Amino acid sequence: GGSSSSSGGGSSSNTSSGGHVNITIWHGYTDVEATAIKKLTQEFNATHKNITVTPQFYGNSDYALQKVLAAIAGGKPPDISYLYGSWAANIATNPTTVDLSKYVKSPSWNWTDFWQAARNVATVNGKIIGIPALIDNLALVYNKKLFQQAGISPPTANWTWQDFENAALKLTNPSKKQFGWAYVNDASEDTVWRFWAMLWQAGGSILSADGKQAAFDSPAGVKALTLLQTLAKQNAIYLDNGSDNYTGVFASGHIGMLWTGPWDLSQINTGKVQYGVQILPGDLNHQTISGPDNWVVFNNGSARVNAAVEFLKWFTSPAIDLKWATMTGDLPIRQSATKQAGYAAFVKKYPGIGVWVQNLSNATQSRPVTTTYPKVSTVVGQAVQSVLLGKADPQQALSNAAKQVNGILSAPS
Amino acid sequence: MTATAERLITLDAPPAKPRRRLPFSPWHLVLAPIALIMLIPLIWMLILSLETSPESQSFPLVVLPSGLHFHNYVQTWNAEPFGDWFLNSALYSLATVAGNLVFCSLAAYAFARLKFFGRDVLFVVLLATLMVPYQVLLIPTFLIVKHLGMVDSVGGLIVPNLCSAFGIFMLRQFFRTLPIELEEAARIDGTSRLGILVKIVLPLSLPALATLAIIQFMWSWNDFLWPLIIIDTASHAPLQLGLSTLQGAHRSHVNLVMAGTVMSQIPMIALFLIAQRWFIRSIAFTGIK
Amino acid sequence: MPGVALNDVTKTFPGGTVAVDSLSLEVDDGEFMILVGSSGCGKTTALRMIAGLEQPTAGTIRIGERVVNEVSARDRDIAMVFQNYALYPHMSVYKNLAYPLRQQRVKKPEVDRRVREVAHMLSLEELLKRRPAQLSGGQRQRVAMGRALVREPDVFLLDEPLSNLDAKLRVQMRAGLKRLHARLGVTTIYVTHDQVEAMTLADRIAVLSDGKLQQLGPPQEVYDKPANVFVAGFIGSPPMNLLKGSCQNGVVSAGEFTVKRSGVPDGELIIGLRHESLGPATNGVPSLDFRVDVVEPLGDELIVHGSLAADLVAASGEDPTAAALGADQGNELEAVACLSPRDRPAEGSTIRLGVEPEEIHVFDAATGLAIR
Amino acid sequence: MPGVALNDVTKTFPGGTVAVDSLSLEVDDGEFMILVGSSGCGKTTALRMIAGLEQPTAGTIRIGERVVNEVSARDRDIAMVFQNYALYPHMSVYKNLAYPLRQQRVKKPEVDRRVREVAHMLSLEELLKRRPAQLSGGQRQRVAMGRALVREPDVFLLDEPLSNLDAKLRVQMRAGLKRLHARLGVTTIYVTHDQVEAMTLADRIAVLSDGKLQQLGPPQEVYDKPANVFVAGFIGSPPMNLLKGSCQNGVVSAGEFTVKRSGVPDGELIIGLRHESLGPATNGVPSLDFRVDVVEPLGDELIVHGSLAADLVAASGEDPTAAALGADQGNELEAVACLSPRDRPAEGSTIRLGVEPEEIHVFDAATGLAIR
Amino acid sequence: MTALAERSPATRHRPPLFKRIAGSEHFAGWAFVMPAVVLIAVFMLIPIGWSLLLSLQANNLLAPGHYVGLANYKALAKDAQFKSAIGHTFVYTVIFVPVSITGALALAVALNRKIRGIRFYRLAVFIPLVTSTVATGILFLWLLDPTFGLVNYLLHEVGLPQQQFLQDPNQALYCIVAMTVWSWLGFDVIIYLAALQGIPEDLLEASQMDGASRWSTFRSVVLPLLGPATLFLVVWSTINALQLFDEIYVTTRGGPLGSTTVIVYYLYQQAFQFFNAGYGAAIAYVLFVAVLIVTLIQLWIGRRRVYYTS
Ligand SMILES: Nc1ncnc2c1ncn2[C@@H]1O[C@H](COP(=O)(O)OP(=O)(O)OP(=O)(O)O)[C@@H](O)[C@H]1O
Ligand SMILES: Nc1ncnc2c1ncn2[C@@H]1O[C@H](COP(=O)(O)OP(=O)(O)OP(=O)(O)O)[C@@H](O)[C@H]1O
Ligand SMILES: [Mg+2]
Ligand SMILES: [Mg+2]
């Protein structure tokens, strides 16, 4: 076909003869995931004669957003696009974003089978604006050998913060450039969400119930941040500058423990270190945090919307979901995937992944899905960073951040 | 015999060198360390590109790879559709280089030598287009290209980049250093303004044109964002965009990426080496008192 | 072939320098006009205005019947030799010479023929493949000339085209130019500082000073009958000796030197004596004492420098008419005579030099104008 | 003040042009040496090698006692006027003139004094604030000269420094140069095409042709006793008339022209007659017929062109010794005589010209060398 | 001044109007610039106008925007973060521009000679320029890593204290300066190399004859004649420095603690992280005006200081 007919999704012609529909799906997958999406769309196209799905790579950095915004502004959005969860609230404001509520309500979708955290992020003000595309969460990854050397027994599911702190300090050895823990210290969402997990574990919450006030400057917040402060002061934390070097450092045996997700497995699993996976240590509880992303459908006419929904339904069906997970190492987005026959093979293929899947049930809370959240995150990220760099006290940092957040929340949008 | 003289004259070394105490020019003592510092990225990329995937991902860097894994290059070269990417990049780069050389020369000459109504204001207006951050221009530019029906085509890459205020400004500055007498002589000899530009000004500006060509080539060749915005189909992508599909957010094969990057730098390095001959004084500005 | 006419042309440069001042000059069809004048008097500027490289501040320039003020240089069909050559540094000598022809879409073989012809005339055959940077100064100048001569334009403008050539070549070039002019009959305006060139080539000479025309006429006339003190002092080398004098009742005198002259009003005068008019005094001609300071042998003649028994004045270039009255302080004035080597005087001696009465020039001291 | 000595210096340019060929030349302390020679004969190249801007291909150059081949130009303490001026285009005239002094860390007031002094000498006072581009050709040349003269270096190198000046200025400059040289006594090497300049300024003249030294000596000697046919044909303007002749038993003859001359071996000869030696034939002197073609009035004298009743030869620059035998095809040869305006002959007439026997030059036809 | 005087033509006896227009410099000038003007107008000026309108809106580029007048600009005036972004940008520019240009000039002069291997040296200087910003970012994050970086390793070897570099709010901006100077040096160098080819050799010779030292020749002859190139580089580097973004994006992302949040990075945050595209456009416009003023001042100074041949 010509160059433009296969692009972005055009407005009209693709529904042409015989009710055949061409749709495009934009993704940022590379490597195994890229192979997987190619394979699975081919499989879909083969089994669905009147729909052709074309996957297109749209970048894998934040720049991808600009491509999507351009496409939307140009009136030619893709039919389906992979979009980060943090964008969901803003994406919802776009008139061409399809409200999928009426589709997923159908029992055949079994909507509640998607993990809670994923459903939360797909829902903006009661409207369902996306189908979960990815779910992950944080668990504790540790270097077995370093634990052994330090004479510490491996972490358990009942580990407390105190256990964690002790272990981290023991694993630290500046002369060997060895750190107990790693923390992403770029003040981005990477910095913030690990803090949220701790906040929740200590019983705190991000915002007040009505969403109009900051609530993280609670004793729980201070407690969480104090843990970071203590470890940072003792040089027990490898402060990652945001380039995700921590996986490499861990893989070369310089870090005792990571709080990370399944996406890092392939980097860690280079054969040089023996690693174990455990759920996060806890304070009041062992909550974790999940960062789900969505497949968003844009309206290019009902025929294409229908086709897009049909594809997503197929693509996120339990069987295909597990297939995807097995091919890529991503976590299954449906709870029922764990009950399928192939699940064991999946867990076996990716050592440790089972912990993350189970840990999803600890991901009970979500970050607020609001348009102001990115700003809130930035403010909190700086607060955390200032403590990690020893520039501020936890209380002081959080109070200051809360003040700013309150300003953000009260500003007219 | 005289033909050889013409070529050799440029190599005639300046006379009266001071007595040498070193077996080599002392400039090497200055230039060699600088060169080393400047070569760090190339060395670094070469090392990474020859490592195994885990080696290349380890941190701190594995400086001595376990072996020279040249198959990284083969593997990258075979990545689908590497050939298309390369071709698209070549097309994009060469076309924008040609466009800039032509359009910028024309405009720069007018700004440098012709007095026309509104010249200075127009010049500042053109310069002003360099002053708006590209972040706010991407989307409207996309809209225009879409309007012209050039989305997802190499043409859409090329056309907005055919001429830049950068090139105009740079060439204007260079043109204004040329001896005006030569242009006057050419006018007397019956040359049109365009003829003067083509036959007198441009041949005397080869270093500047080579510079513009190198820089524009480099920009187009390394361009990532604009292709990302307007290209949808993999086979229409230029090299940098194509290579980015190898470079996942989390699971990247740094070795393959670096192999690709090294390969993608080869044309730029080649062009630079070719253009070098224009950085040796090729025309002595004599014949004018 | 069209002539060239300047009508009251003035050129004022930004900054206020008046390079050419109300210059009116008609060069006839096919005439060989030579412009002379002191350094910086506006010769080049005048040529550049005719060529269209400089816009006159006032006045009109005509080529043939056409007013060309608004006509661009390339449409005037003028060939010019630039004072500073302006050779194309990136082209070989051959290409430099071929360039004007190629611009006129002359066919390659014809170009080749004419380039070789002009290269032969200028003794450049051996150098055709060189670049300007590989040439000597004189060779460059010849290329510059060749680039003009290779064409057959309406007008030739030549700005000191032979200044860097040796005497022999210059003679040869002069002959070549003369032949060329005879053959093509192209209106030519030629700037030179070489008086021999001016005298031998010109149909008419225009003497400029300070942007203003001083005299216009055939060379011998200008030499024999300088219109004013400036021309008298400028034309001829060494320049005319100018003496402070006066006239009383038809007798013109300067110191001991006296001569009867009718038609000269009483009053202050300047008396001009050419060096070659001065010779060993013979009976009956006006004469005066000459103290010999320096004798310069020139091979074929002797230039004798010294002082005359009268007050010398200088024709200053600054204000050609009036300034003749003030002596130039910086360079002490000296008189010059030209003697045959056979008459060589001793340095320090005083000799008596005489002059034929009809070879004595007389100028009004106030206006500087010649009195005839 | 140190002298300059070139010892067997050769410069071959890439491409094979031999610009200077085994040149040996000693310029004494404080001497004023003038280099003359045809265009492209290597004068500028020789100066540039002395200056250190060009490395000799072979031979040594000495300044004073020091061999300077390896000394960089800036350490040679030489001031140079470039044939193409090479003024700093971005500096005012004042700054151009001050530049060499500022380089020597001369104090500002002293710089100012000397700049104004040299500007006065060169009549540049009014132009000090201008940039070179705003000057006329002659003004630029004077700035170029000023930039050299403002210093007091070990050696002055001046490459045709007066070529673009009018006759009057040239006389003035010459006088200034002479005074300066007398005052400072700086060794000076001066290139010129102006024979008057060469004759009046030089202590000695070096005549070059094709990169080779032809003759070296005081000006009058070179004029009176040219060492070979090239020099004879080159020095003097118009050049010496050269006739094909022969000698038989002590009688030198060319056509009807005969003269007794002892010490001349039998064989082919070239006979040289200077134009000023030729005059209306008087009794007893050797004489010959002259057919007058053209009479050129030069103001003070007449140049008469025509043909002699003998075969003329040309002293070609290409091969100065031997080529004298072949006539120059391109420019028909003509003889030149110089007469007083009073003796003006009619064009087309034939006159009889005589010459004093001692003013006849004789050269060996094979080697071109003078026979005395 | 020259322009003024030469523009006044003699007025009488004009050729026909058509010829006058077609042959005039006005016509030729516009004809020459027309292709460039059209291209730049279509692909630059229209987008710039579009974003001017955007700056008057509340718009997230997703929902239809609405006009809010100058509200974005008013908010900017009170935005403390914007002010600190201006401060960072200013500091960066004031260091980057002179350092990179003088460094490049020195290097270009060193590279403008005929010695063995000079092509290799030139190529070496060119290498950082062709290295993509992303790769440069990754490289520097490694070189400057406080724990595992090469630089700290070298400091350690020579007994100097370890530094935090990009992780220290007091050092990060200077590290960015160093990194950008390093990676852009080649650009300035090739411009200067090209410009050096245009300096007439006889002037250098004349300067030698005048007894000038190498330094003096450089200062008094070479440097002034490089004026046009220098003016170009100053203007261009300033325009770019004031719009610094890519290098920040691939390394510090504005941190630590906002210490490298420069204006355009802040713009990016607002437009594409916080979805305040209208506000981002307003930032772009404030920056635009500032850059324009700075550029005009530079051009104005250049007009008086820089020597051209015409
Ligand atoms: N760079 C060069 N490459 C090749 N040949 C050269 C070069 N420079 C000069 N020449 C040749 O060397 C010869 C001597 O040149 P030079 O400039 O010394 O002559 P010159 O005596 O100064 O002549 P002129 O009186 O014309 O200035 C000439 O034939 C010239 O063509
Ligand atoms: N661009 C300019 N700006 C200002 N003054 C100028 C400019 N060009 C020339 N002049 C001045 O105008 C006058 C005439 O200059 P022009 O070049 O016509 O003189 P010229 O007669 O050719 O002298 P020369 O014999 O020295 O070449 C000079 O005094 C010169 O200084
Ligand atoms: Mg002139
Ligand atoms: Mg010369």
Image (cartoon, coloured by chain):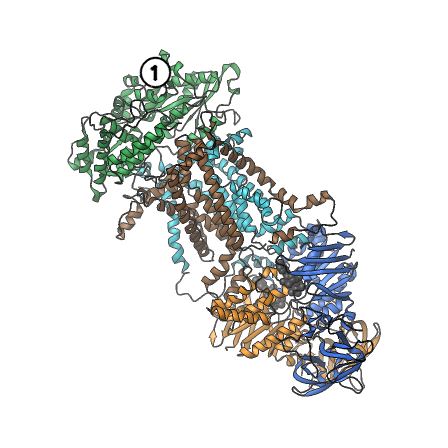
Chain colours: A green, B cyan, C blue, D orange, E brown
Please provide percent x and percent y for residue A63. Answer: 42, 33
- The quadrant the C terminus of chain A occupies is top left
For the view shown, which residue lies furthest in the left direction?
A: A151
> Circle 1 sits in a helix, a strand or a loop, which is it?
helix
Q: Is residue E130 left or right of residue C147?
A: left
Find out if the beta carbon at label 1 lies less than 8 Å from the nearest ligand 2 atom: no
Answer above or below: position of B124 versus A65.
Answer: below
Indicate left or right for B55 with C262 as reference: left
- Give the x, y percent position of residue B89: 49, 37
Q: Amino acid at mark 1?
A: Trp
- Of residues E19 and A144, the one drawn nearer to the viewer in this rendering: E19
Q: Is residue B278 visible?
A: no
Residue tagged 1: A111
- Indicate whether B7 appears above or below D214: above
Instruction: Give C167 or D168, whichever is nearer the viewer.
Output: D168
Q: Pointer 1: residues within 10 angstroms few (<14), some, or many (20+)?
A: some
Tag 1 subunit? A
The spot of residue C105 in percent (x, y) is: 70, 49
Question: Is D192 placed above or below A336 here?
Answer: below
How far across and down, in percent of the image, does residue D231 sit? 66, 75
Q: Quadrant of residue A398?
A: top left
